Amino acid sequence: MSRYKKESQLYVYNPQLQKSTMAAIGNRGTVTEASGFDPEADVQKLRGAMKGAGTDEAAVIEVLAHRTIAQRQRIKEAFKQAVGKDLADELSSELSGNFRSVVLGLLMLAPVYDAYELRNAMKGAGTEEACLIDILASRTNDEIKTINAFYKKEYGKSLEDAVCGDTSGMFQRVLVSLLTAGRDESSHVDDAQAAKDAKDIYEAGEARWGTDEVKFLTVLCVRNHQHLLRVFEEYKKISGRDIEESIKREMSGCLEDVFVAIVKCVRSKPAFFAERLYKSMKGLGTTDSVLIRIMVSRAEIDMLDIKAQFMKMYGKTLYSFIKGDTSGDYRKILLELCGGE
């Protein structure tokens, strides 16, 4: 049976999680509340879609791609009440491939989906470091705390333990720092401190033989976003280089990737995700795990801004890229989440 069967507890509705999820969500998403929402009617539509031989995928898309996370939770409850079965389990056995991955992702609360993705990234041989970086470098303190709590409850061990068992060295230390959810989230900028931070990073990297990565960690993982933007300006004055360029010169591999991701997220999360989407589709083949994760997790938060950034950065619409790079029902549901050209 699919790997989703074993994870069926992931679909349990939890009002507490729901509240923290909705609090974190802005309204720059392509997916918004369906007006005249009727969970019972949606349940009938979904049951009809799964009746008999084959599945009516169009009906599944019509319902799930046009409901918010909160509305989907109510559909799940109504389905269980009416049928005595779990909607995610039923859909899991009816669908397959990338289309199924998108649908099942949509049925989860945001922190539940993040925890689930992190778990999958570390399961079995090898690690999908890109997943750890994408999620941990871009989430707020509250989001990370909720992911931590859910991970522990669901998988019986702390996310920190899982990360420590799966990564090493300085990369591990950066992830652990991000997992403490201790970043200053005020908008206070201390000019003298910003100048000192910039000087510390410069002296820890460009100005010496070898690199003292701890200095980078202390500044990039702890300071607030407004303060960091000032640090980046000061850094350029001192070094004559952009901070991203220096990180790329001083570091390599996953450590370089995570620090660059933090800098990009500080500057603009939508631009960070637009670039990740572009790279997941350009060239031969598609990195579906990245494409699915971003489309599912950002659809209700900032997909409108991601689309605008994508157009600005690449001169093409995200919609046209997805259309040219995917096919079938998988393409259809992603295009619905993208919300038109």
Image (tube, helix red, strand yellow):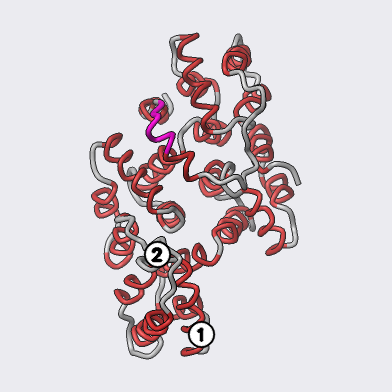
- The residue pinned by badge 2 equals 254
Rendered view: 208 above or below 214: below
Q: Amino acid at mark 2?
A: Cys
| Badge 2: residue crowd in 10 Å (few <14, some 14–19, many ≥20) | some
Question: Magenta residues, as a range?
Answer: 13-19
Magenta region includes residue 16: yes
Rendered view: 180 above or below 34: below
Q: Position of residue 146 (x, y in %)?
A: 36, 43
Q: Count how many numbered circles sit on residues in the image.
A: 2
Left or right: where 42 falls relative to 246:
right
Left or right: where 135 falls relative to 315:
left
Q: CA distance from mark 2 to mark 1?
A: 24 Å
Q: Circles 2 and 1: CB distance less than 8 Å?
A: no
Using the rendered view, name the quadrant where residue 330 is placed: top right
The residue at the point 32 percent across, 71 percent down is 218
- 187, 216: nearer the viewer: 187
Q: Position of residue 212 (x, y in %)?
A: 30, 80
User: Which SS class for mark 1?
Assistant: helix
- The residue pinned by badge 1 equals 236
